[in-house]
Image: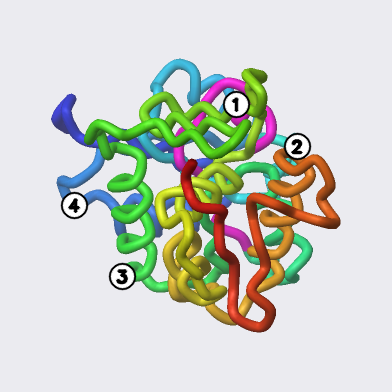
């Protein structure tokens, strides 16, 4: 396969799923790599430097959520979870750990390809980005850095994406569904708890008093509005 193709790391220990994914994705668009457990996945993430990771949560040596957390310590590579676990708390744990998307098995090839392309477009966007200054908060989109009173704030990739969307629309009211569709995709329009969790985390990291937020303002029953740029 061509060296310039986006590299996708498939992390799954089930041979049937491996074959299915290779068949679905071996279409000339991607360069595919394989890992069958968490330790191999961590090594492959370093050695192959993938543009995207497809990750099963039920790995034989460690839970997929732990794999996500370890990768997020040094990389922002998009991670799409592919799992039979369909409970809301499993999805929230994976997303909170830093996963960018979550597909429940079984899923269609068309939906998987669409999610992959969205994730790659988002991560490969290289247009110059501005720096936003809002009171004591600085959001540098080009460098993906968030500073409060000059001190860098550590955010998960999903928290950053939510903040970025709110900041770039500062002063405007964004509905819950608008944010869910933009950040997680149409499949998550009826899962507002995922958004609430991330907004709550952002408030605890950015606000002086998370119970009385000044930056991320709730528009009751509608959505959220970020304070206008100063």
Residue 79 image point, x, y percent: 50, 44
Q: Name the residue located 70 percent from the left edge and 52 percent from the top edge.
A: 214
Q: Nearer the viewer, residue 222 or 97?
A: 222
Location of residue 87 by image quarter: bottom right
Q: Residues within 10 Å of mark 3 (few under 14, many from 20)?
A: few
Q: Residues within 10 Å of mark 2 (few under 14, many from 20)?
A: few
Pointers 3 and 4 in contact (CB under 8 A)?
no
Residue 174 image point, x, y percent: 49, 69
- Which label was assigned to residue 147? 1
> Which region of the structure is painted magenta?
68-83
| Viewer-nearest of discs 1 and 4 | 1
Where does label 2 land, which residue? Answer: 62
Residue 13 shows in the view: no
Q: Is residue 150 magenta?
A: no
Distance Cα–Cα, label 1 vs label 4: 42 Å
Q: Nearer the viewer, residue 160 or 69?
A: 160
Q: Secondary structure at mark 3?
A: helix
Distance Cα–Cα, label 2 vs label 1: 33 Å
Is residue 50 depicted above or below 224 in this figure?
above
**Of marks 4 and 2, which one's residue comes earlier in the chain?**
4
Is residue 220 depicted above or below 59 in this figure?
below
Where does label 3 land, which residue? Answer: 110
Residue 200 shows in the view: yes
| Viewer-nearest of discs 2 and 3 | 3
- Is 41 placed left or right of 49 in the picture? right
Q: Secondary structure at mark 1?
A: strand
Is residue 67 depicted above or below 118 in this figure?
above
Q: Secondary structure at mark 4?
A: loop
Distance Cα–Cα, label 3 vs label 1: 39 Å
**Of marks 3 and 4, which one's residue comes earlier in the chain?**
4
Pointers 3 and 1 in contact (CB under 8 A)?
no
**Of marks 2 and 3, which one's residue comes earlier in the chain?**
2
């Amino acid at each position: 396969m061509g060296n310039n193709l986006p590299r996708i790391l498939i992390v799954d220990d089930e041979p049937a799923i491996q074959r299915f994914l290779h068949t679905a994705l071996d279409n000339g668009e991607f360069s595919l790599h394989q890992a069958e457990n968490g330790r191999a996945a961590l090594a492959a993430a370093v050695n192959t430097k993938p543009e995207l990771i497809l990750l099963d949560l039920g790995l034989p040596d460690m839970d997929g959520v732990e794999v996500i957390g370890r990768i997020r310590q040094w990389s922002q590579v998009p991670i799409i979870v592919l799992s039979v676990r369909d409970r809301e708390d499993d999805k929230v744990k994976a997303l909170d750990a830093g996963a960018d998307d979550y597909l429940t098995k079984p899923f269609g090839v068309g939906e998987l390809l669409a999610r992959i392309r969205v994730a790659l477009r988002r991560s490969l966007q290289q247009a110059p980005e501005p720096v936003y200054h809002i009171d004591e908060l600085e959001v540098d989109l080009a460098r993906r850095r968030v500073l409060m009173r000059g001190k860098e704030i550590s955010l998960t990739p999903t928290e950053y994406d939510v903040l970025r969307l709110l900041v770039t629309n500062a002063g405007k009211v964004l509905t819950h569904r608008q944010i869910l569709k933009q950040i997680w995709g149409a499949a998550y329009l009826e899962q507002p708890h995922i958004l609430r969790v991330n907004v709550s985390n952002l408030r605890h990291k950015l606000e002086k008093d998370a119970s009385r937020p000044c930056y991320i303002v709730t528009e009751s029953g509608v959505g959220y509005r970020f304070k206008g740029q100063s």
